[in-house]
Image (cartoon, rainbow, N blue to C red):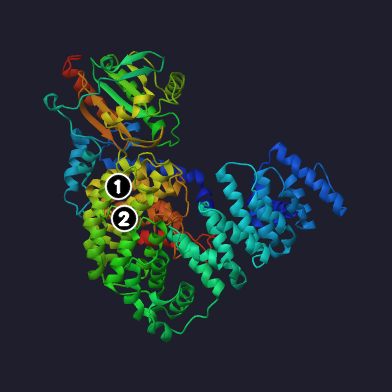
Amino acid sequence: MAARIGLPERRFANHLRWGIGLLLAGAMGCGSLSPDARRAGGTGHEQCPSCVATARSQKTTTLPPGAPETTELQAMLATPWLEPARRTVVFPQHYQFTTQDGRRLRAGQLFGKPVAISFFYSRCENQNKCPLVARTMAQLQAKLAGAGLEKKTSVCLMTYDPEFDTPERLASYGTSHGFVFTPNAMILRPEPAVKRAFFRELEATVNFDRSDVNIHGIQLLLYDHRGYLARSYHTLIWNNEVVLQDLRRLAVEGGMVGER
Amino acid sequence: MRAYLVIGAAALSILFCKGARAQIPLDVLGFPVAMELKNQKFSPAQTEELRGLLRRESERTGGRYDAAEPVPAALARASQAGPNALAELLGSNDRYLRELALRALAIKWGPGAKLAVPKILDVIEAPGEGTPAERDHTTALAIRAVGRIAPREYVVINALAVRLGRTTDLPPAMRLALIEVLGQAGPSARAALPRLNVELTNASAQFQYAALQAIGSIEAIDPPSLGDLLEKLPTRLPASRLPAELVTIRKAGGEARALVPDLVKVAASDSPKYLQCWALEALAAAGSNDLCAFELALKRAASEDAFVSQLATQVLARIELKAEQAVPVLSQSLSHSNVSIRLSCAAAVKRFGPAAAAATGSLIRALENCGAQSSEDEIGAYLEALKSIGPAAASAGETIVALLDERASIFQDRAKYQVHHLRGFMLATLAEIGVPKSAWPHILDSLANTGRRSAYVFAAGARAAAQLGPAAKAALPYLLKPMTREISDNVLTFETYSSHQSSTREYTNCLIESIRALARMGGEARSALPFLQELSKPDPFARDNPNRLMRLPNVAEEARNAIKAIES
């Protein structure tokens, strides 16, 4: 069977490329997405007019019990946006980190501006998880720069595997995935001795076999300038366009930029 | 043309390799030892000792000795001269080499190695250097070896009976080996009967029962007729008769059910453990539809003695009660503090299938209580039970979804492959009982984020997505992954948790599950038609032999069915 599929490989690959593109755009109901957002599978389209329209039209189709509607599904892949007064989950303050250039950093030093945090580990062999997360974070960084927000917000990647991921490895991993290190864009390594407690407190979707990661999800946490959690994206890779809007909103809240 | 050349070259290379391998006569030592020789990297000291042995053996038999020849091959060749070389190896100071020789003598040579018996008996008396555990291991191996080579020799029986009687704190493996080997000798070992009768009072049920069987084998009493057996109560019989009675019960099967009330009494009494074990084994042989037998077996399955617990589990598997009688008892026992009893109950619930729907609540609570300390088998047993109940167990859906969370304690401190297997089987269970809304992120995760090598999780996710029909359209792009070889096409089954074998020889893979999910999606999967049309063309390499060990559904046929479903 595999051999048969392989024969018209090039034509087949082309079919697939535009096929998936069309399907994703169709499934997400959003024709204005950037290429990376198309690949991403998209979440948090509540504010996107075309998605809202699609969702409305989908309400007329008959769904079997148990199947969520599209908007419901999107809601399942991200937590609802919390207004400042309703934010109660704060980033754990009593931990320290090492950056990719070997600097020591207290949790409190991360804040003062909105922060987007995601997770990975360099030994992850699943191309659909950590490498994709790292590349998407690098693209988010580029988008923030394009929107003039690169100094008003921070972007952090955090390793699940501090035993193996030395600062040197983190620096090399970040660079090879397009991440540009600045005072507002860094990779962090928690203390190995307290990593389980830290990730548990953070409610990160990860579990360990002794010291190795045995399972982990995809997760992006958005904190406001005070260190309060405003929203999280999970399960599928997030849509950077939507995250950009969220971060802009957090920057406005914190007084880093004026309202447009 | 080029493809044919490549196939031809591959076939030739396989033939050539096979031929080359066949020239190494490792099999003369017997399969297990030959395998060990193949895989073992001898230490320099071991190699030196083996080379010395081979040199002497060559000189003795006038054979060829080539110092450049690898030791395993040379040893295998040398051993064709007989067990002498191996017997000489029994005197080695190296424990590994001594054990290697014992296994080779027992497995390859058996009764043909009688000349080595005195040396093996020496090993039983003085197993050489090593830790106590290592010495016990060597001794037990020597006992088993002599049991294969000369079980009926007076000198052997005498030596073993003396060894059994000499100390009261023999290591378990050695004691069991002595009892069983004496039993294998049959009537020739009559001299060992007094010693074996003493073993009937051992604290462990396993040793008592092994002694009972050995005594039966030595006494070699003819099995009575079923009529005779039904007239006498087993408790009044001497121990030596019991194994013969068991033979009769096994032969009679269901016809011996008249004995069940008596057997239950014996198994429930404070009688000696060997008698309780005998009654349990007889109950398992006779089968039963007796509620008392069922409750007794459940109680005994919780025994602290692992041997009794194992026998009771066999009884449970043979009891044929109606669901309305058994399920209430099973449901109650699913919360028992003893894990063996919970496992037995889950297995029994599974046998009842949808008729055990009333046990769903207990299974949910049992699953909720699972954590990092629970064995994989236990979690798997509950999932299997729910899966066999089917849609009537839909209320377990949310519990399973909670366990699918990456942070769930059941994943803590388990290896990656175990975590993947657990998650895959949970999704497969959801596909059978019904997929709740909250499972959607996990289904998407299994389809979108699974790595190339995690076919099990992907296939389970596709199966769960199929249950949602047209509403699974958000998963459509990911369901195409097997068609572009982004995920491996390993053959797999979701029949049971712990086995990768299917009892029906029917298997599946990611591609089949994806095609079926697309078919269930109907018109929503229209954009997948080009892929399905490609797959629907007859495959010249397809082998639809119904006698194959692993049967996969025909991909082209599945694709055609899917196209029909989508276009209609």
What is the CA distance from the residue labelled 2 to the residue labelled 1? 10 Å
Amino acid bearing label 1: Cys
Q: Which numbered tag is attached to residue B382? A: 2
Percent position (x, y) of residue B453? 46, 44
Position of residue B221 in the picture relative to residue B23 (left or right)? left
Q: Is residue A260 visible?
A: no
Q: In the rendered image, which quarter contains the C terminus of chain B?
A: bottom left
Percent position (x, y) of residue B173? 53, 54
Q: Is residue B484 visible?
A: yes
Element at label 1? loop
Which is more toward the observer, A5 or B124? B124
Question: Residue under mark 1: which chain is it in?
Answer: B
Q: Which residue is mark 1?
A: B370
B112 versus B422 height, above or below: below
Q: Residue furthest right?
A: B62
Asked if labels 1 and 2 touch by Cβ distance under 8 angstroms, the answer is yes
Which is more toward the observer, B317 or A150? B317
Discs 2, 1: same chain: yes
Question: Residue under mark 2: which chain is it in?
Answer: B
Which is more toward the observer, A184 or B215? B215
Point out the tag, 2 or 1, that comes first from the N-terminus.
Answer: 1
Which is more toward the observer, A41 or B491? B491
Position of residue B127 in the picture relative to residue A241 (left or right)? right
B284 versus B367 height, above or below: below
